[in-house]
Amino acid sequence: MAFCNNCGSQLKPGAKFCENCGALAEEEKTPESTGAAPVYTPPPYQPYAGAAPPTAPAGGKNFGLPAIILACALVVVLIGGIIGIVTLSGTVSDLKEENTQLVADKNQLTNQLNAANSTILSLNSDLSAANSEISELTGDLNTATGQINDLNDDLSEANSNLNAASATIANLEDENAELAADKSELAADLADANDSILSLNSIIDIMDYNYSEIIAFIETRFGLVEEDATQFVTPNDETVGELVDFLVTPFTSSDWHKAWDDMQYLYTWVRNNIEYSYDSPLPLLPLDLLEGGTIDWFGEFWQYPVETIYWERGDCEDQSLLLTSMIKNYGEGGTYAYCVGISNGESGHMAVFLPVEGGNLVIFDPTG
């Protein structure tokens, strides 16, 4: 076994350099083998022919040859021991040197071992700290892993919700598209409806106007208001004038007897040529066409004189209005004739009144 003289590391057999420090390895000295002390071997016994073996002298023992042999053997052993001692002394010296080197190597190795142990202790301390940190990090990692798992669950749920929301958005977009189409269609319908409303409003305005005209016409025909009643006396009507001119000659204020006869003739013509007829009831319409209301019926209907002439029929007020218009046309403003009506709430009557001289009053009643 060989060791490096520089660092004390064990060298491999046949190595020329130290693998640890690279120093040149010295050849290992092998102590010379001295061998064992030579052993004397006596020559083989050769008997002499014809000779008798020697015999010990009588009376004593013969020690010559064995003693010589023994002495030689002792000498040889002594010489071999001396040689062995010398050889062993060299070997012991070498072994001491080698032992010294081994002690040095041991001390060096011990120092290295102590340094290694110190390093190991430091590394063990670092390892313990690292293990503690690893344990802490492992705990943190487990916590983080749990949080990641929770986040993954939340992410999965969020993805599911997102998919549901996306589907909902897609449905809403489809509905929005349908609503947009419906809106466009409704806008077109609304435009048509607005046009219809404008048209209907125009029609309603016309109907309201016509309805107002009808109401005014009907209310006028009742003759309940003085202004409405006076408009039925029409001495200036062309048809009335033509009829008066056909029946009598023109009026002269200088001949009242002729005038009286002419007015009586007009009265007689009305009485004989206008047939009495009852009025058809007229409706009392609501003032507002759209709001509506109840409709009452009123059994009076005033005719204009020209209508009475055309229809050749009428009740008391129709004939009185015609006669009054004829007398006023005849007198050309110089005669006074009045239509006077009376009523007791359930029935009424109308006749023509003419004031004359002396505070007297002439009554023409065509239907009386």
Image (cartoon, grey):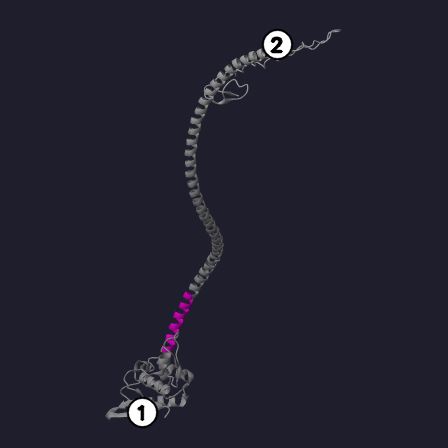
Q: Position of residue 12 (x, y in %)?
A: 53, 21
The residue drawn where x is 42% and y is 38% is 128
Q: Please report whichever mark, 2 or 1, sits nearer to the chain's N-terminal start.
A: 2
Q: Which residues are magenta?
A: 197-215
Q: Which residue is mark 1?
A: 363
Q: Which residue is mark 2?
A: 68
Q: Is residue 363 left or right of residue 66?
A: left
Tag 1, which secondary structure?
Answer: strand
The residue drawn where x is 42% and y is 41% is 132
Q: Position of residue 350 (x, y in %)?
A: 34, 89
Q: Position of residue 365 (x, y in %)?
A: 34, 91
Q: Is residue 98 left or right of residue 272?
A: right
Give the Cα distance between marks 2 and 1.
226 Å
Q: Is residue 295 left or right of residue 16?
A: left
The magenta stretch spans residue 208:
yes
Is 31 or 213 nearer to us in this picture? 31
- Which disc is residue 219 wearing? none
Reply above or below: 204 against 97: below
Mark 1: which amino acid?
Ile
Local crowd size for mark 2, using a 10 Å CA cut-off: few (<14), some (14–19), many (≥20): few
Reply above or below: 366 against 78: below
Is 184 or 300 nearer to us in this picture? 184
